[in-house]
Image: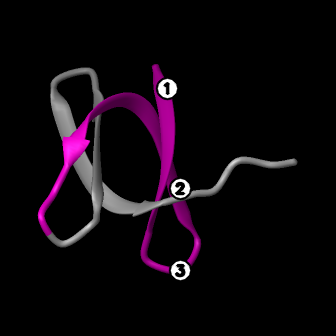
């Protein structure tokens, strides 16, 4: 399942959901790299 996270103030990354960290950040995997950031809420 694809998830979008926000890194910093204006950088977004979309990738395969890889888990949630204890501090609430989400991790997504893009190829062989893993990124952590704040989850972006879904549009209504």
Specify the label residue 26 is tagged with. none
The reply to whether dot 1 and dot 2 touch (C-beta < 8 Å) is no
Question: Residue at point 27% right, 66% down?
Answer: 24
Quadrant assignment, res 23: bottom left
Mark nearer the viewer, 1 or 2: 1
Q: CA distance from mark 3 to mark 1?
A: 21 Å
- Please give the residue where the numbered disc 1 appears in the rendered image: 2
Majority secondary structure in the magenta region: strand
Q: CA distance from mark 2 to mark 3?
A: 9 Å
Q: Is residue 30 left or right of residue 38?
A: left
Q: Where residue 18 appears, x then y in whole percent?
A: 23, 33
- Please give the residue where the numbered disc 3 appears in the rendered image: 9
Q: First in sequence, mark 1 or 2: give its number.
A: 1
- Check disc 3: other Cα within 10 Å, few if <14, some if 14-19, many if 20+: few
Circle 1 — which element?
strand
Q: Where residue 40 appears, x then y in whole percent?
A: 57, 57
Instruction: Name the residue at the right extreme.
Output: 44
Question: What residue range appears in magenta?
Answer: 1-22
Q: Where residue 22 appears, x then y in whole percent?
A: 12, 64
Q: Is residue 40 left or right of residue 44?
A: left
Q: First in sequence, mark 3 or 1: give its number.
A: 1
- Check disc 2: other Cα within 10 Å, few if <14, some if 14-19, many if 20+: some
The reply to whether dot 2 and dot 3 touch (C-beta < 8 Å) is no
Magenta region includes residue 36: no
- Residue 4, relative to residue 32: is it above or below? below
Q: CA distance from mark 1 to mark 2?
A: 13 Å
- Residue 23, relative to residue 29: is it above or below? below
Question: Residue at point 18% right, 35% down?
Answer: 33
Question: Residue at point 87% right, 48% down?
Answer: 44
- Please give the residue where the numbered disc 2 appears in the rendered image: 12
Q: Is residue 36 left or right of residue 8?
A: left
Question: Residue at point 26% right, 21% down?
Answer: 31
């Amino acid at each position: 399942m694809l998830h979008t996270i926000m890194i910093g103030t204006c950088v977004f990354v979309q990738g395969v959901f890889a888990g949630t960290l204890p501090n609430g950040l989400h991790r997504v995997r893009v190829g062989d790299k893993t990124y952590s950031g704040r989850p972006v809420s879904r549009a209504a």
